[in-house]
Image: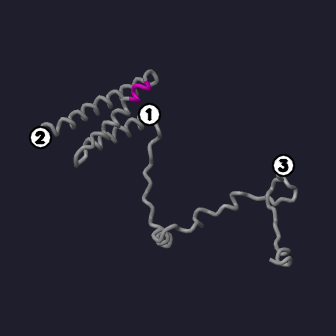
Amino acid sequence: MSEQEESKVHINDRRRFSPEGEAKPDAPETNPAAEAPAPEAEAPETASAAAEATQEPQAEMPQMELPPASFQFLVMSIAMQAEMELTSSEKPNLSVAKHAVDTLAILLEKTQGNLSLEEKRMLENTVTELRFRYVQCAQEPAKS
């Protein structure tokens, strides 16, 4: 490279802080959020993603209103998982059902003394009922 070409190179230091960590008085004010591209502006990574981006957005499914988070909702959610596995139209998935029942049993053990009478009874009854249903489902193939 000739000297003439080297003189055309100009370096503009845009860092806001000096090597000592002090703010430079002549540094431009920047907003990191403004510099980052919007997520929608990113290029699709695959051809199928590009095709989906060009299509009109489909009508969104109506959102179901969720109940407030509570201990009862937690217990019922885990119990429903176990029930679904035990009452599967195909072969019941006993290992997943057992895991859900064991999770509720651990919850019962770890919350000992910290539940209201109503919460304790609900959890105990749920664990007992699910254990009974699990045993029934586990013994059912043996009878056949």
Q: Is residue 112 left or right of residue 32?
A: left
Question: Is disc 2 surrounded by few (<14), some (14 to 19) or many (20+) residues within 10 Å?
Answer: few
Rendering coords of residue 52 (x, y %): 47, 69
Secondary structure mainly formed by the magenta segment: helix
Determine contact: label 2, label 3, CB under 8 Å.
no
Q: Is residue 118 visible?
A: no
Give SS at disc 1: helix
Quadrant of the rendered image containing residue 125 = top left
Determine contact: label 1, label 3, CB under 8 Å.
no
Distance between the Cα atoms at labels 1 and 3?
53 Å
Label 2 or label 1, whichever comes before in sequence order: 1
Q: Residue 20 got which mark?
A: 3
Which residue type does callout 2 highlight? Ser
Magenta region: which residues? Answer: 106-111
Which residue type does callout 3 highlight? Glu
Of badges 1 and 3, nearer the viewer stands 3
User: Which residue is drawn at the image coordinates 41% and 34% (left, top)?
Assistant: 72
Label 2 or label 3, whichever comes before in sequence order: 3
Label 1 sits on residue:
71
User: Which residue is drawn at the image coordinates 81% and 53% (left, top)?
Assistant: 17
- Which residue is more in the foreground, 62 or 36? 36
Rendering coords of residue 127 (x, y %): 32, 30
Q: Is residue 9 above or below residue 128?
A: below
Label 2 sits on residue:
144
Confirm whether the magenta stretch covers residue 75: no
Outermost residue on the left side: it is 144
